Image (tube, grey):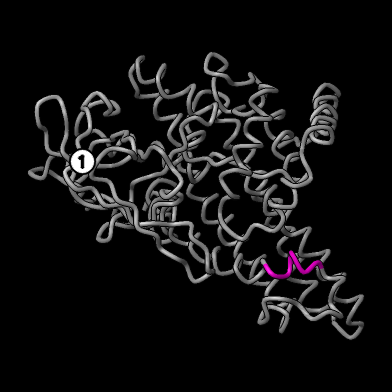
Amino acid sequence: MDLSFSPDELKFQQEVRQFLADNLPAHIVAATRNNSSVFVEKEIALEWQAILVEKGWAVPQWPVEHGGTDWSAAQKYLFSKECYHAGAPMLIPLGLLMLAPVIMAFGSEAQKAEFLPKILSGEHYWCQGYSEPGAGSDLASLKLRADADGSDYILNGSKIWTTHAHLADHIFCLVRTDSQCKPQHGISFLLVDMSTPGITVEPIITMAGDHEVNQVFFDNVRVPQSDRIGEENKGWTYAKYLLEFERGGGFNGDRIRHELNHLKQLIEDIHTVTPGFDTSGSIARRVARLEIDLKALEITELRILSSISGGENPGKESSIMKLTYTRLEQAVSELAVEVIGYRGVAMDPPENDSGLRPDFISSVVPRYLNTRAASIFGGSQEVQRNIIAKMVLGL
């Protein structure tokens, strides 16, 4: 693959750099740098989203008629790359990059008109209702009931590991509408207002000490059938389509490279304050291995982006990329913990380590703990290997 860029593309890259220099606030960069969770805080993400919406650059992946940019694959890649290099946060993808493509592909015209503008503006802040206490990797075994009652459904059951449910005003859910057929054939895809009576959100505090995920309970929650996406009992098809965007619709290589650059700077800083710290040998080899693997990931992302730009969904390659970026992200965070050593035990680093950016040091261990969950969310590692074995290797 030719990774060189044309003069027009390089000109566009400079335009993006200048825009970021002029419009990306320093407090957003700081919040992103010190964040240890999957997503930055809601307020930070929405502030940056509003800036991009005003510029018209918030959703390059969307079609122009819904607010997209009509950028080429190279422009999308360069925009993402420059955003990460400048320290900008990833926009919360639950509505923008996961639900929106499903609405565009399978939703009614009324649903497109109602939901897409509010997703773009940030008026609607979405969470994802997929996993349940007894249905994680085996998602098709979900049991959240949606029983028809006139023109409505009545929902009873729960969802778990629901990221930002305590902050969201809407949730898109997979629900059981038929129990008498094959599990995958009895699932529907619903859009639910979180203010509907009968919904309760209970926090789950992770081992990293943050409140990011929740369990959501549904007790006789009434939802209009008009808020179902597509056909009844066809939700499994829509869910798989969405998961391909969750696993493969972004530019994780640039994000991980940004984190690796922070780690490399940290290694240099520790060597400065602790001259006996060995930056060669094992550490140097592991950093080099990460650099090589990141280059391979970036090339895969460009191939997937090319498919998306041509009107296709990410496809089976998204499972390959999900496995790869999870492994690399975890490897970076694991090496960071090893590098800081005893400094990861105390909440506040010793005073003589003040040159090591204590704000970043204090987020290293929580970030390491949080990235452990990446082996599961978006489809577990085992599930992704099964997909690759079947769809790529033909086993």
Residue 200's place in the image compared with 191, above or below, is: below
Residue drawn at point x = 92 percent, y = 82 percent: 275
| Point 45% across, 43% down: residue | 316
Question: In the image, residue 180 lies at what x, y percent?
Answer: 7, 44
Which quadrant does the N terminus fall into? top right
Reply yes or no: does residue 254 show up in magenta. no
Q: Mark 1 is on which residue type?
A: Val
- List the residue tagged with mark 1: 221
Residue sitting at the far left: 180
Q: For the residue labelled by badge 1, is the local secondary structure a helix, a strand or a loop?
A: strand
**Along the line of sight, the residue nearer the viewer: 84 or 320:** 84
Q: Residue at x 43, y 57 (%)?
A: 213
Residue under the point 38% across and 49% down: 394
Give the total of numbered labels. Answer: 1
| Above-or-below relation of 63 to 267 | above
Q: Residue 87 appears at what percent x and percent y?
A: 75, 47
The region drawn magenta spans 357-362
37 vs 95, left or right, is: right
Q: Picture coordinates of residue 80 (x, y %)? A: 69, 38
Front residue (pair 365, 247): 365
Q: Quadrant of residue 309?
A: top right
Residue 55 vertical placement versus 86 (above, below): above
Task: Give the percent coordinates (x, y) of residue 340.
Answer: 74, 77
The reply, left or right, for residue 62 in relation to residue 277 is left
- For disc 1, the neighbor class at 10 Å (few under 14, some 14 to 19, many from 20) is some
- Per the picture, the main secondary structure of the magenta-coloured stretch is helix
